[in-house]
Image (cartoon, helix red, strand yellow):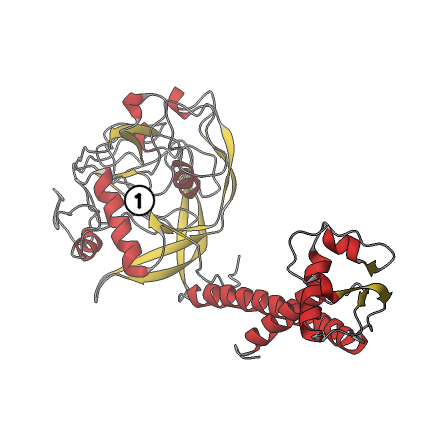
Amino acid sequence: MRHYHRPIVLILWAIAAFSVTGCQKTPFSVTIAQNLDYNPKFFLSSSRDLRQNSQFIINKGKITEETFNQSPDLNLDNNYIAQTPQPLEKSNSNFFDKLLIVAAIGGAIGLILWMLRSRLLSTNSKLNATVSKLQVVEFQKSQFTTITLDQAGHIIDKTEHSADYFPENLSQNVSLDMIYLRGGIFTMGTSLEEGKPSEKPQHEVTIKPFFMAKYPITQAQWKAIALLPAIKRSLNLDPSKYKGDNHPVENITWYDAVEFCQRLSQLTQRQYRLPTEAEWEYATRATTNTPFYFGETITTNLANYKGIFSYALEPKGEDRHQTTEVNQFTPNAFGLWDLHGNVGEWCADTWHDNYENAPTDGKAWIKNKDLNYRVCSPVRGGGWIGLPDDCRSAARRSEKRNQCHAYIGFRVVCDVGNIVIPELEQ
């Protein structure tokens, strides 16, 4: 149906309304002087006034001179009223009444059909809008090997893994690999025997599916986005102390990292942001419950940290005193690199001293009654300057958001949103 059906429906609806209120006629009789020059049209008009006048005394369907004289509002000459009542011939309106009833039914049906059609059109418009926003990305699969250590730092297992990801093009020669994480339930924090008070109490958290960058954001990736128009703040094109396109960007504040995410979101029309603490720890553990995703300890053959100190029984290693390229070491079972060491990584949350009353849905924990911590956020992963203990999966520390250091960088996550997820192999 085209739009011209709407006036017709409205007209039918109006007729229906009129038929309900106006088609019922009350028959009555009056007496008319037989010898007067009587104007039927005038009398019909007057009779309608008579019927509508609430002061009339209508008795057995007849109007007399007495009742007429009691009505001050009508301007009829008394000569028009005769002493002897005679019935007024009743108009035959059955045909018109039936016609109006049929029109009323038709109008009601038309109105219902119009409303149903409008509802369907609205629903279809919403569905079409949703479909038009769906984003199809080209998933690829990466193959890699993970390593497990014992307390002495010996390799006790090597396992082949694969991960699904899509490359996000940032510029002609720069891309960003985003690993798909299916989500799940994990235990966040540390046991009584391990870690610090800020990492307790342990609690279960449910994580929804999301994407996480395979590496910390590199200097090449940073520059590609920093060249884009500012949203809330300007960005230094080359803030890092330790140079190299494939080295992680560092020396950036929490606000700089958020600006990067906002520009990246605007470029790609996807929701990029900093990871929550829960997402970061879930991604780092990669189903493990040991201090490191390598197992019971860590070595400088597998990560960049202050290796002149030991965590367990492993031998001491080297202290590189700077960042290293992001693809130099070994990933975890999710296909993520450099979550232990290299640079600490900003998280989205506001800092809290411990996990008392922490959310269990994986969302960022923003509210904090302590005013001192409202300008602080967690940093995870330790960094090249960190001790082995600082690089554990559960380790966390607080940094002011407006501070920048040569050992703090970040990586991004992306909400699934309208991205079409194919049937990926488990």
Considering the numbered disc 1 on the image, is that residue within a helix, a strand or a loop?
loop
Describe residue 89's horizontal placement relative to residue 264 as left or right. Answer: right
Describe residue 199's horizontal placement relative to residue 112 as left or right. Answer: left
- Between residue 9 and residue 333, name the one nearer to us: 9
Residue 327, image x, y percentages: 27, 52
Residue 122 in view: yes
Q: Name the residue rendered at 16%, 40% in the picture.
A: 251
Amino acid type, label 1: Asp
Residue 154, image x, y percentages: 38, 38
Image quadrant where one finds the N terminus: bottom right
- Between residue 415 and residue 409, name the one nearer to us: 415
Residue 315, by quadrant, is top left
Residue 157, image x, y percentages: 45, 45
Disc 1 target residue: 338
Residue 375, by quadrant, is top left
In this picture, is 14 found above or below 361?
A: below
Residue 148, by quadrant, is top left
- Between residue 42 and residue 397, name the one nearer to us: 42
Residue 128, image x, y percentages: 49, 68
10 Å crowding of disc 1: few (<14), some (14-19), many (20+): many
- Between residue 47 and residue 232, name the one nearer to us: 47
Q: Name the residue rendered at 30%, 32% in the picture.
A: 377
Q: Name the residue rendered at 57%, 67% in the picture.
A: 118
Describe residue 119's horizontal placement relative to residue 254 as left or right. Answer: right
